[in-house]
Image (spheres, rainbow, N blue to C red):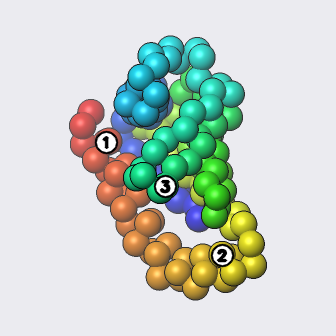
Amino acid sequence: MKIVKTLNVPAEFFYQQIINSVIFDIRKSTGETVKEHQLTNYSYVKEFSKSSRAKITIEEAQKNQRYRFNTSTVRNEFNVTYDIKAVSDSQCEVTYTEEMTSHGVLQKANDTLFGLFLVPFKKKQLVKMLESMEASY
């Protein structure tokens, strides 16, 4: 899945919003306080419920340009990238890319079937999130 959207916010603002959210999530999930410069290659486990958890690895945090992470569960692996390009001092173009790899033939078939229905919904939710970040500026 790929979404490209121009936002009326500076690249620095958008990137910092992502980083603040990530640092908050790490603190909430682990109790650790991590600084921005420590994020690249940082991994932690996030528990969604008693029977559902994921290992999240931040693969890249390139200031004002890119944020990339991997989420791995027993069923799937998600690779997400936010590429941020400054268009002007007050605008940036965000390219969101998400790739999913399913573990196992049955899981892959299940994800393909549900993906047909869920991808449009996920895209709509992501655009709403981006617009909400823009509105908070």
Please identify the quarter of the rendering in which residue 78 is found.
Answer: bottom right
Choose mark 1 or mark 2, whichever is in front. Answer: 2
Residue 125 lies in what quarter of the image?
A: bottom left
Quadrant assignment for the N terminus: bottom right
Q: Secondary structure at mark 2?
A: helix
Q: Which tag, 1 or 2, sits closer to the chain's start? A: 2
Residue of label 3: 52
Q: Quadrant of the C terminus?
A: top left
Q: State the residue position of label 1.
A: 134
Q: Position of residue 29 (x, y in %)?
A: 43, 33
Q: In percent of the image, x 58 and y 15: which residue is there?
A: 37
Residue 44: % across, % down: 57, 33
Q: Which of the 4 image quarters holds residue 8? A: top left
> Circle 2 is placed at which residue position?
107
Q: Amino acid at mark 1?
A: Glu
Instruction: Give above or below for 42 relative to 82.
Output: above
